[in-house]
Amino acid sequence: MQITLAYAHWRGKPTSWFRIVAENGHSILLQSDWDYAGAAATFGWVPCPCKQTDGTVRCAHRTVQDMIWEAYEFLKDTVGKTVEDPGYF
């Protein structure tokens, strides 16, 4: 099954939150910054080249805050991308 990254909407307007939308229309709301690193990785983001972190734990090279912010920015730039579902649905 394919999933697509989309902005969440509130009262018809986009928010700063994201949704992962399945091809059958079901969706998952990503509203916590702790969700951003995992979702961004699903769509191709790598938290650190050292591969010693998933983006929610500090590594020798990067802080958690830096990685979460970068994941959020990556998600903003990736809205509309479709990938194979790794297990959200």
Image: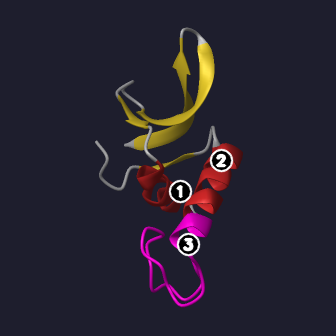
**Three-letter code, disc 2:** Thr
The outermost residue toward the top is 11
Dot 2 or dot 3: first in sequence order is: 3
Q: Are the residues at dot 1 and dot 2 in contact (C-beta closer than 8 Å)?
A: yes
Give the structural element (helix, strand or loop) at label 3: loop
**Residue drawn at 59 percent across, 80 percent down:** 62
Image quadrant where one finds the N terminus: top left
| Residue under label 3 | 47
Give the mark, 3 or 1, whose residue is nearer the N terminus.
1
In the picture, the disc for residue 71 is none
Report the residue at 60% width, 51% height from top.
72
Q: Spatial distance from mark 1 to mark 2, Cα to Cα? A: 8 Å
Q: Is residue 47 left or right of residue 21?
A: right
Q: Is residue 28 above or below residue 38?
A: above
Describe residue 56's horizontal placement relative to residue 6 as left or right: left
Residue 49: x and y, percent?
60, 84
Instruction: Point out the image quarter for the C terminus.
Output: top left
Which residue is denoted by mark 1 in the rendering?
40
Q: Which mark is residue 78?
A: 2
Q: Main secondary structure of the magenta part?
A: loop
Observer-side mark, 2 or 3, equals 3
**Residue segment shown in magenta:** 45-67
- Location of residue 4 with respect to 85 vertically, above or below: above
Is residue 4 located in the magenta-colored stretch of the structure? no
| Helix, strand or loop under label 2 | helix
